[in-house]
Amino acid sequence: MTVIQDMKPADACGAGINCCSSVASSETSIDESFACAKPSCTGDVVCKPNYCENWEVNFDHCKQVNIEFENVKYTVRKFNFQERKFVTKEILHGINGAFRAGELTAIMGPSGSGKSTLLNVMTGFRATGVTGTIRVNGEPISTNSPSFRELSCYIHQDDLLRPLMSVGETMMLAAHLKLGFNTSKEYKQNLIKHILTLLGLEHRYNVFAAKLSGGQKKRLAIALELISNPPVLFLDEPTTGLDSSSCSQCVSLLKKLASLGHTIVCTIHQPSALIFEMFDKLYTVVDGNCIYQGPVRELIPFLEGQDLVCPSYHNPADFLLEIAVGEHDRDLVKLVNAANKKYHEDTDNQQINVQCLLSKIKDNEACSKIASNLKRFPAAISKLTAFDYVKPAADDVSLEEMKTLNARAATNAMMDDSDNEVGSAARTKSNDRYTAYKAVRTEQASFIMQYFLLLNRIFICARRNYFLLLARLMSHIVIGLIFGYLYMNVGDKATTVLGNYVYLYGSILLLVYTGKMAVVLTFPLEIGMLTREHFNRWYGLTPYFLSLLSFEIPFQSICTVLYTVISVYLTGNNADESFRIYYFIILAVLASLSAQAWGFFVGATLPTKLAVFVGPILAVLFSIFGFCTRYIDITPIFRWMWHISYFRAGFHGALNAIYGLERPFLSCPNDTMYCHFRSPKVFLNYMMISDVNMADCVTLMVVVMAVMHTLTLITLWHKLNKR
Ligand SMILES: Nc1ncnc2c1ncn2[C@@H]1O[C@H](COP(=O)(O)OP(=O)(O)OP(=O)(O)O)[C@@H](O)[C@H]1O
């Protein structure tokens, strides 16, 4: 018999003698389990990569996490424009409850009752305005804390996936990010295969996410999070938008995961009777209060106890929702009180159980007597029956560990059959194995690897969605040709200086627009995905942002260079000294990149609808400084804008590059008596820009870029961490 020692590796699982189906998994014999604890493997980093061929067993290890919450309230504070003051609104009104390991819990309730809010609060997605106590395995914890974030993941309703990445690629990227590079690729491939098989997605390995069905997308979203094997999974409406067969597939998958020991909590809308019965527990929210929590099978007796009799052949879920919306003349306060009473009774019962275990009573009959009084709680009785098997290791078991003992783990202990010696050896080996596994799965990719992985993802997506990039490139080429032909050969003549002036202004304006608008529009779309992935600890914000810049900056620079080279050649600005062209290109690139930095900031700060017109307005605003506007003509209160205008710096720098820097006389037609701008200096004096300092222009644009990118990073950080 495998005694408690065999369960002990579960304290490697983190919650004392509780363990998932790990060692004593019903799918794997104990011998098979130990077969992967190779003698050479001591759990150190070196042995991790090829650590275990029988790695599925490792995957099935998970920390057993029971979450309890008490008197949880959530209040939002909003400015009311009608009342012209801040008003507070309490959405959750001091609810209690528990989500347990190995159980699939559904949060149900009518629309607007507070289901998503409860999920947001429990995941830590909302933390401001939350009061009450949340305990994990008996320990009070802040859901916002890194230790809680490590334990759980939150799968949102809208599965945001990269449409042009295949299932396999998406999974491998997540595996690289979450498991780091100390884990071998082979290990990751096996793990991915295992998870995809578990989720019924193995046959979609090479299919792009865009081509998956709604149900498959949801399953992929779950699969991605399973790579780090989080003990707790929160899912917001995983069945919404699915047909009945996909819906049932999705819930049975969640049930399967729960059976592996995960704590699974999801919100759900009006499930069919069949799906409703698949859940272990139910948590019903109405107007921010709980009107029922407990096993699904106890719902009908509970309601009957409240004089609410479910008609025969009626779906209990529908009946419950009818009660919730007030169709059955229910007394909400009475229901809330009854639900609270039931919750406390259940909790008291569990405490009696734990007390019984803690007392380490030699005489098992004493416990059995208590158990016999707890007829309503068969799970509790099974714990007590397992007492014998717990006893041998009781000295090693801490109070907290004992508290988290649950029926499932105890039953597992009973199922094993080995004597203490074998159990002890098993424990040692399994501990090694779990330690190694834990080390593998908790080690994330380093900062630099996160950066390269994310950059690679951008390249893959860009390559497959080349049309957008091609359009950006082509538009620069085509407009370069159009501008070039419009202002053909204006660059080297004194009589066409004003034409060239307009060409230079138009060029900077174009490059500022293209630089800014390309990111103003696309960046807000990225933020949703960034929020999800960052919240689930895939990567840090800085490597993400750097990878984005590493793609966007060179690409925009290439576009700018293409435009300038074509148009400069056609306008004849390349006639004399070539160094002027290089200066012009550098200034044009910097102006475009400064605008791009502004675009990132506007896109990160404002919602898309607002960003699309604020972006151009800002571009126009800054573009007028320096164009036919002399510094002395600017109203003093706006002069600061002249100083900070990157557009002005780019434009003046470009003019200076073309007409300044001691440019020789321009050519004049022979028959012209008077040639006003023969000397380029005359023109620069006329425009009052003869004192332009190239270094100042370059510095201003570089500073604008640095400041705006820093502000974007701060804004994003604030958005990601404002909860
Ligand atoms: N940030 C907020 N500010 C103001 N009210 C809010 C906020 N968040 C939620 N609410 C309100 O709280 C109530 C509960 O919202 P919640 O989204 O949790 O409901 P739900 O049960 O998930 O609804 P549904 O099933 O329709 O998604 C709603 O009345 C909603 O308007």
Image: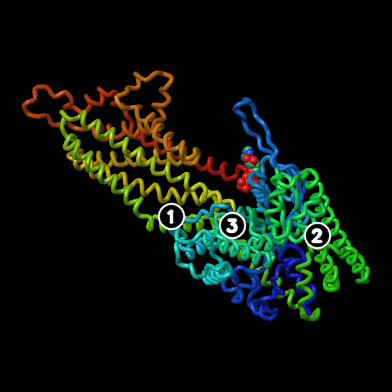
Residue under pointer 2: 400
Choose top left, top right, bottom left or bottom right for residue 565. Answer: top left
Marks 3/2 in contact by CB < 8 Å: the verdict is no
Horizontal relation, residue 88 to residue 645: left or right: right
Which residue is outermost to the left?
671
Q: Are marks 1 and 2 in contact (CB under 8 Å)?
A: no
Viewed as shown, does residue 635 lie left or right of 423?
A: left
Q: Is residue 4 above or below residue 530?
A: below
What amino acid type is highlighted by mark number 3?
Thr
Q: Is residue 400 above or below residue 9?
A: above
Q: Which residue is mark 1?
A: 458
- x, y percent for residue 411: 78, 71
Residues at discs 3 and 1 in contact (Cβ within 8 Å) = no
Q: Nearer the viewer, residue 418 or 316?
A: 316
Which amino acid does the dot numbered 1 rest on? Ile
**Image quarter hosting the C terminus:** top right
Real-space Cα separation, disc 3 to disc 2, in angstroms: 36 Å
Count of picture labels: 3
Q: Which residue corresponds to the image point at 34% horizontal and 53% vertical from the top-left?
A: 467
Which mark, residue 239? 3
- The residue closer to the viewer here, 115 or 245, is 245
Sequence-first disc among 1 and 2? 2
Relative to 703, 57 lies left or right: right
Asked if one can make out residue 144 in the rendered structure from this viewpoint, the answer is no
* Res. 255 visible in picture: yes
Please tell me the numbered disc located at residue 42.
none
